Structures are given as C-alpha cells and as structure tokens.
Amino acid sequence: QRTAPLQLGGRSATPIGWALLPVFEKGTEFIASGAFQLPLFQGPVQLPLMQDLIKAQAEGRGVEETVQGWLDAKKVKFTADKSSVFVRLLEDQRLGMLPEPSGPGTPGVAFPSYVGDKLQPVFLKKSSGKPYAKAIPRGVLADDWITENNAVLAASMGLPFV
C-alpha cells in the first residue's frame, strides 16, 4: 500500500515498505557484519509487531523466527512486486574483511531464513533504473545532493533531520 508522496525541496519520496535487519549477532553484543538482501514488507511498521520482537527476545526467540511467525499468521506480507534492499553492515574493526565489490547476487550475500530458497531469485531483480551516482543533477555537489536525499527520507518517515 503506497501513501501520498512527501514533497520537499522540489523532490518527493513515497514510502513503499520496510525491512528488518538484526544489527547484532544473535545472543551477543557484536555487530552482525555482512552483506544482506532484505525483502520489503507492505505498509507501515506496526507497533504490535515491534512489541512482538521485544517479547520474543525476552523469551529467547530470534528475529527471523518471529518474522516467520508473522508471515505464517499473515500479519505481514512482502511487497507485491517482491522488492528488496541490499545492505552491507560492517563493524569498523572488521574493515577489509568483506570482499569488494559486493552487491545483490554476489557470493556471501545472506537472505533471512524466512525468505526461503524458492523465493530468493524472485527478490533479485535487475534494476531498471540508473545508478545512484548518475542521478545527481549537473552542477550539484554530491554531498549536497546526498544531504537533500537524507532530509527527504527522514521527513518521509516523520523523523527529524539534523
């Protein structure tokens, strides 16, 4: 379900979904460094789902197990077009430990277990858009453009941008 686009500085952002990435290795206080392909879920994040995560953690259940329960109970659905995001998470102390370059479909990219082997190829679609760097308008500094995009993204989620 798409919501109305947010307008900011002549640009717009339309929320289409959300993803969930456990930042820490299960049962530890260490950053879960790696490359991840995360499916997007439809609609806004619902407070009861976040409360489920807190309860599951207190009961010793993991994030992926909890999300699988949501999918089984039809509390969440993947976006209709099976969109996903690629995320690299790397603790500063581990710089150089992940292969370069890394991207969707490269070896070592992890999918959450709730995606399953059959659905993994569906979430790996070739992008039909232009590369991020080519989207920067002529005459605009890359840093300024990134700052403006971050402001639009924060505003679309109702977050302050400082």
Image (cartoon, rainbow, N blue to C red):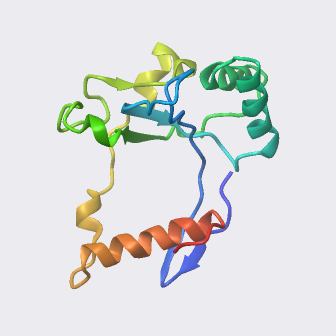
Looking at this view, is 20 or 17 the one in front?
20
Tell me if I can see residue 75 in this picture.
Answer: no
Tell me if I can see residue 158 in this picture.
Answer: yes
Q: Is residue 61 left or right of residue 112?
A: right
Residue drawn at x 53%, y 40% as measured from the top left: 81
Q: Taking 15 as reference, is 108 above or below it?
A: above
- The residue most toward the top is 117
Q: Is residue 99 left or right of residue 47?
A: left
Task: Tell me residue 31's x, y (percent).
Answer: 44, 33
Task: Tell me residue 33's x, y (percent).
Answer: 37, 32
Task: Tell me residue 24's x, y (percent).
Answer: 51, 31
Residue drawn at x 43%, y 30% as measured from the top left: 32
- The residue most toward the right is 48
Residue 42 falls in which quadrant of the image?
A: top right
Task: Tell me residue 95's x, y (percent).
Answer: 23, 39
Q: Is residue 61 left or right of residue 20?
A: right
Looking at this view, is 28 or 142 the one in front?
28
